[in-house]
Amino acid sequence: MSAIVAAFASVFVLLVVAGRGAGLLLLILAGLAISSLAGAATALVMNLSSNPFAALEIAFWLLGSLEIAVSAMWRWHCPSSRRAR
């Protein structure tokens, strides 16, 4: 649900930056500017993180690592693989 809200917010920001009567080239350039700002914000969060492992987790997730999601799905679908406490 939050991804849908974020997608609508980014389209709204794009239309505010480019204007209502913007042409295709202006929309593309405004989208590139917003994408660059989002990448810079991500790099800032990674550089300012106090935990170096958090920065590694962010970097692996940005590179497409699904290790956490896959391991959680595996534990959900295979109850025998859950660790005994």
Image (tube, helix red, strand yellow):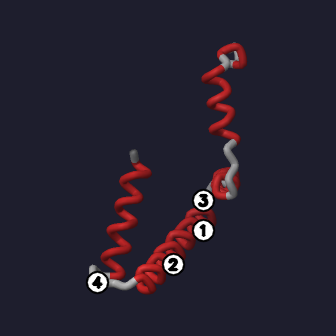
- Are the residues at dot 3 and dot 1 in contact (C-beta closer than 8 Å)? no
The residue drawn where x is 68% and y is 53% is 64
Residue 39 placement, left or right of 31: right
Position of 56 relative to 85 (above/below): below
| Front tag of 1 and 2 | 2
Crowdedness near tag 4: few (<14), some (14–19) or many (≥20) residues, C-alpha within 10 Å: few
Which amino acid does the dot numbered 2 rest on?
A: Leu
Q: Nearer the viewer, mark 3 or mark 2?
A: 2
Quadrant position of residue 68: top right
Going from the N terminus, do you reach mark 1 or mark 2 first?
2
Q: Which mark is residue 32?
A: 2
Quadrant of the image containing the C terminus: top right
Locate residue 27, reporting x and y percent.
Answer: 41, 80
The location of residue 41, given as percent across then percent down, is 52, 69
What whole-number distance in Å separates the C-alpha atoms at marks 3 and 4? 40 Å
Task: Look at label 1 and name its amino acid.
Answer: Ala
> Is 81 situated left or right of 50 in this image?
right
